[in-house]
Image (cartoon, helix red, strand yellow):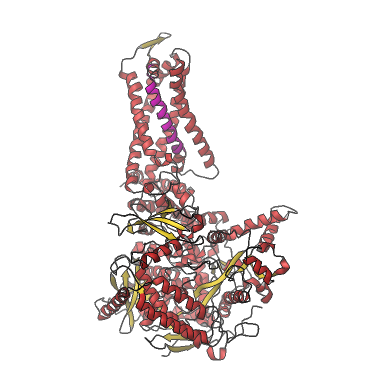
Amino acid sequence: MILEGKVPPGALDEKWTKYRSTMPLVAPNNKRRIEIIVVGTGLAGASAAATLGELGYKVKCFTFHDSPRRAHSIAAQGGINAAKNYQNDGDSVYRLFYDTIKGGDYRSREGNVHRLAEASREIIDQCVAQGVPFAREYGGLLANRSFGGVQVSRTFYARGQTGQQLLLGAYQALERQISLGSVTMYNRHEMLDLVTIDGKARGIIARNLLTGKLERHAAHSVVMATGGYGNVYYLSTNAMGCNVSAGWRAVKRGALMANPCYTQIHPTCIPVSGEYQSKLTLMSESLRNDGRVWVPKKKEDVERIREGKLSPVDIAEEDRDYYLERRYPAFGNLVPRDVASRAAKKATDDGFGVNKTGLAVYLDFEAAFERYGKSEAHSSGVHNPDAATVRKMGQKVVEAKYGNLFEMYEKITGENPYETPMKIYPAVHYTMGGIWVDYNLETNIPGLFALGELNFSDHGANRLGASALMQGLADGYFVIPYTIGSFLSKEIRTPAISTDDPAFAAAEEDTRNRIDQLLAVQGKQTVDQFHRRLGLIMWEYCGMSRNATGLQEGRKQIQELRAEFYQDVRVPGSTMEFNPELEKALRVADFMELGEMMMEDALNREESCGGHFREEYQSAEGEAKRNDEDFTYVSAWEWKDGDDSVLHKEPLVFENVELKTRSYK
Amino acid sequence: MSWFSKFLTSSVGKKLIMSLTGLFLIIFLLVHLIGNLQLLADDGGESFNMYAKFMTSNPLIKMTSYGLYFFILLHAIQGLLIWSKNRASGGSKRYSGGRPLSTWAGRNMAGLGTVILVFILLHMWQFWFQYKWGEVASATYDGVEVRDLYEVVRHAFQNVGFVIFYVISMIVIAFHLHHGFQSAFQSLGLNHQKYTPAIKAIGTAYSILIPLGFAVIPLYILFAK
Amino acid sequence: MKLNLKVWRQKNGQAKGGFETHQVVADEHMSFLEMLDVLNQDLIIGGKEPLAFEHDCREGICGACSMVINGRPHGPNKGTTACQLHMRSFKDGDTIHIEPFRAASFPVIRDLVVDRSAFDRIIESGGYVSVNTGQAQDANAIPVEKNQAGESFDAATCIGCGACVAACPNASAMLFVSAKVSHLALLPQGQVEHENRVQSMVTQMDKEGFGACSNTYACEAECPKEISIENIARLNRSYLGASLSSK
């Protein structure tokens, strides 16, 4: 299969403008007849559904949640990037483009990334107009903060709840379209299959989660925005319901999965506390603006901390190893996520982990308390304040910035982070890989589009902080409304698609068989038990660092687990009712197949880049070693039942950026 | 539906009616108490009886009193309508294993209000109706003949059972006021961190002092006269 | 730690529900929902129906979790959702009552799962700024005073969980509605449609069958995001103002 990125020709900064202005359009009278299915209501899905509705298309929107507002975009904390240069610190569209390409370790498409950087500015305008309450300066203008991997302040934020505010903005825009009748909302409906007719995406099979009924929904085009697949690791910062199933069903119908091994392990999460753990909680990357990461220098201090005999606050400054500042003086604690995570792994692998399991490092705010306290004392006219006053004043400032995060930390761990440093450890957070799409965000199945975290296109091998929200909203508000025209302008003569088409009956039958198969096993292990085991395999062999032997072993273990799953899983209840265990079982079944493909992809990519670190390919200092000669391509995998997946390559062409070894030193 | 009836039948509008009528009744209580305190004067009832005559003959006050009856009825009827709608909305009263985080009075305003309504009806029958149409002896002060309401009141407050009922009713009013006072301001939309603490403090003082003032009178008459 | 759970079981909206007793062995570091996970694993292995409860992000922001724990929505801790409640808030041997949110406008679907779509319909009735994509001016063209933006944000942190309704003896949705009205009213962008918004949202709220606010403030006490009843006061005066002045 020849993969064509379809990036328009021309100078980098003119591609999108020109393409947008010359793209075929659909006339308003035709829009009214054309139906579009949008699956997912996160930032990308909700903004796409709302905008397509505004444009006059007939939109049907689906979510498995009870309300569109529950999508996991809501949990994003830190912020959203935009090249506004409001801080006058040298930011520009090009710099955001460059940072994103570099941050992604040169494994993303130039054209897509530049378009993203351009759209970033419009996103902020749009969100402010919708009433998103971003943080403000005293003069009433928008405030910014900096995030990992960059040296400018371009992150817009709403305390530690930016994702929530942005999603509510998109959700409200969606609700407005629902009230106007241009969008029909289907809550508690889960997409279980994609229907293609004559090779084009023409509908979905959705299960009504309340009644269990399988429903057929037809449209001229299907837009999927169903998020990432981090839950393949079982433990991740994703919500419990996040899953790959919608995307995976598309893969099983012929869509390609691109770079599935690129997973982002976020460096600042609350460490695992026990086997019962159901999910991990992120502490926003913005904390690294003010927090310093360290472990003790001496092994005996580590021992005494683990035994509970020593408190970290009693360790002298010279006995602490601020390893990020030591190893990466240029960026310090603000190195990109992949670098920070691997550094934490190295510190704990070397035996310096600071909790009972040995899998935690400190994130310390003492220096910030002092710095802010001094400045606060100065501006409020307190001269020569004592240390306690400074600390208190500094804590107030930190509280205003990150209060909700500190509170969340205390609720989960029972420890007060104002008094003792936070303990953190990397955890699976985001998946850069996803469904392969071209410049139009169209998959290799005509009429099927993938947006947001579900697609692979913008973040390369590593995503920079505060870029996920940007991409989700860019795709939904500013890209798909235009690019969908490239497909739909050819469909204006197509009458409404009928659900009586045999393709619908066949897909429905397939889905029913899958459900019946799972319910028929009635084995002895629960779905969660399988999911946990899958997660352990993935984390062990395809986690923060990978090697060829491990990946082969991991793949074998997943195959065995999958066989066992269909022999011994126990799914209670029946199909024609509200049955959350059945929903989970279907999702875990898909995760197992995906997990295997991730191993294949990681094995094929014989280099270290971004979130993908192959132990065989590293420098003497333990830094990732990319192989641009052989691997400057997108791996797009085609699923083959019961056989190896087939690799299709899309070469990555860099016309504007010189490929360099990423250095944050 | 006109905007006015739409407003009045909305849940927010209904509460506004409760608030405005409630505030009127709150003020009325103060006026009523000032009058009643004349029962404590040691003049054989003269000042109280003169006051009663004034209150029933001044046309302006007469007008106001019709307003008062209307507001009492409106407050009561609207209150019961809200209560029945709120019951139908199936709130939180049925949880097991713990107590709700709200005041008892706040949750039982309708019950308290019903007790107060019964008290008011009885009160009206006993004093107001008797004064207007009952057989009441006369008293003459400086040549002016008035009906001797003082005697009616004194007689009633000699009855221990009635005094107990009266005092309990005042306690009920105290609870009703304690929630109602600050609640009236909230329903009007007056809540601000600057002045709401003051409203609450005044409300608490008011809800204790006014009923206490009323309750002291029968107790004084029962024990001292 | 050993716990005695009295959990509400109800097959569907029509069925009559009741409490069922179960024993669970939990760890004090578990979250409350992880403790329920343990219960469900036991139930499934034992061939019984697992307890249905709604949950998703498990970090206190999606608003999916919705249960009454010992008489209180989201349990005993202030400003905490059920998913963020940890077992260290309980003692070994405790009996814990777990029930669904109760309100006529939140019909039970199964066990602890209730239908809160009434909230979506209230937002649909006007809880937005009517601005199409691409129509916006530059973001810094609209200055917003810092504290006012902060107050707007505080109201906007509502997670739409419905604890306010569940806590209210009248099942009133005033805190939810007023939080959205306040969030938008406090920003210049939201002022334009303010009067229409407040009227249509109140009308929809009444239509959904929520009760009237009787100022018990249980909602504020139980709100996991600690949204202030000052918002309700703002809604009250806005509604009065809008009714008097809108045309």
User: Looking at the image, is A465 positioned above or below residue B163?
Assistant: below
Q: Quadrant of residue B77?
A: top left
> x, y percentage for residue B196?
52, 42
Magenta stretch, main secondary structure class: helix
Extreme residue in the top direction: B143
Extreme residue in the right direction: A384
User: Looking at the image, is C127 positioned above or below residue B101?
Assistant: below
For this rendering, which residue is in front, A203 or A595?
A595
Q: Is residue C128 covered in magenta?
A: no
Residue at 45% over, 29% down: B211
Q: Is residue A437 visible?
A: no
Q: How many marks overall?
A: 0
Q: Which quadrant, please, contains the C terminus of chain B?
A: top left
> x, y percentage for residue A125?
51, 66
Could you tell whether C119 is left or right of A110 in the image?
left
For this rendering, which residue is in front, A47 or C138?
A47
> x, y percentage for residue C104?
33, 52
Which range is magenta?
B155-181
Q: Quadrant of residue A140?
A: bottom right
Could you tell whether A70 is left or right of A316 in the image?
left
User: Looking at the image, is B39 positioned above or below residue A545?
Assistant: above
Q: Quadrant of residue C43?
A: bottom left
Q: Is residue B171 covered in magenta?
A: yes
Q: Is residue A201 visible?
A: yes
> x, y percentage for residue C143?
55, 59
For this rendering, which residue is in front, A280 or B6?
A280
For this rendering, which residue is in front, A293 or A10?
A293
